[in-house]
Amino acid sequence: MAEAHEEVLTRLREIVIRSAADRRQLPTERELCRQLGISRTALREHLQALEVVGLLRRDQGRGTFLQSPDGVALGNLLDLAMVADNVQPDDLMYVRRVLEREAAALATGRLSPEIHARMTGLCAQMRAPLPAPQIAAADHEFHMLLLQCSGNAALRLLGATLSQSLHRSMLTMREFIASDRRAQLDMARAHNRVLEAVVNGDSQRAWKEMDHHFTLNERIARRIAHRSKTTAHDAASARVTA
């Protein structure tokens, strides 16, 4: 039974790939059932699984279309895979570091005036005394724009998926940064240096500045862990003396 299920998925994947090379529209449900040798109910279950992760879009009366995957949905799936395979956020952050160093180098000299202006504004937001969610949103958009400007679709997709999966831990970091003015300014300056290197067309410096940015992330994460441990210790001591 499992082998038959895998065979259907493999054949459906081949059909989806052919659709991507053609006009991004899948054959009708009747035709798909004929090609795959399955019932319409079984077909809809398979299509719904692809729709959930944002790979397919069904338009009433028009058909089923292939579309760019949803980073949020893929990030949620990655969360589940991390739990199942005991993957730690630090492991994902390392992969993100590797990807974004290359993205920064590839993006050098590729920013349009509009994107440059937008990223400059995002750096200003990261310096401003704003609530943590707004700082996190500015940070996220900065990195997504950089991935987009790399010109590499795989980097953009993988980076967006990793960023979504790491969203909760990054928000914790941003809450800490928003409460620590020195850390906030250090992080904003790190983003500024990445942007300067990219705009100036210096790929080696862009790579190094992005690497420095993630080193700074690690230092801040250690400070958060130390503060949490100290707070927990103080709370335990207070309960003992109460």
Image (cartoon, rainbow, N blue to C red):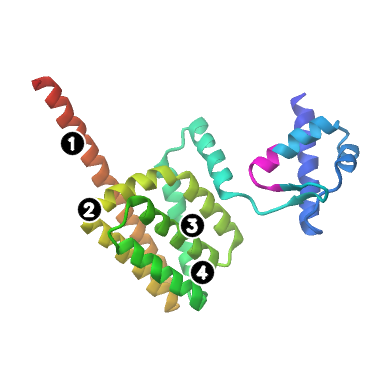
Q: Which residue is mark 3?
A: 99
Q: Element under label 1? A: helix
Residue annotated with mark 1? 230
118 part of magenta stretch: no
- Mark 2, residues whose alpha carbon is within 10 Å: few (<14), some, or many (≥20)? few
Tell me which residue sits at (12%, 26%) in the image.
238
Q: Which residue is mark 2?
A: 180
Nearer the N terminus, badge 1 or badge 2? 2
> What number of labels is visible?
4
Q: CA distance from mark 3 to mark 1?
A: 34 Å
Q: In the structure shown, which secondary structural element does the residue marked by tag 3 occupy?
A: helix
User: In front: mark 4 or mark 2?
Assistant: 2
Q: Amino acid at mark 1?
A: Thr
Q: Which residues are magenta?
A: 49-56
Q: Position of residue 42 (x, y in %)?
A: 80, 31
Residue type, numbered disc 2: Asp
**Marks 3 and 1: CB-CB under 8 Å?**
no
Q: Provide the secondary structure element on which disc 2 rests.
A: loop
> Closer to the N terminus: mark 3 or mark 2?
3
Nearer to me, 205 or 12: 12
Asked if 210 appears above or below 242 in the picture, the reply is below
Any magenta on residue 53? yes
- Image spot of residue 170 (x, y percent): 38, 47
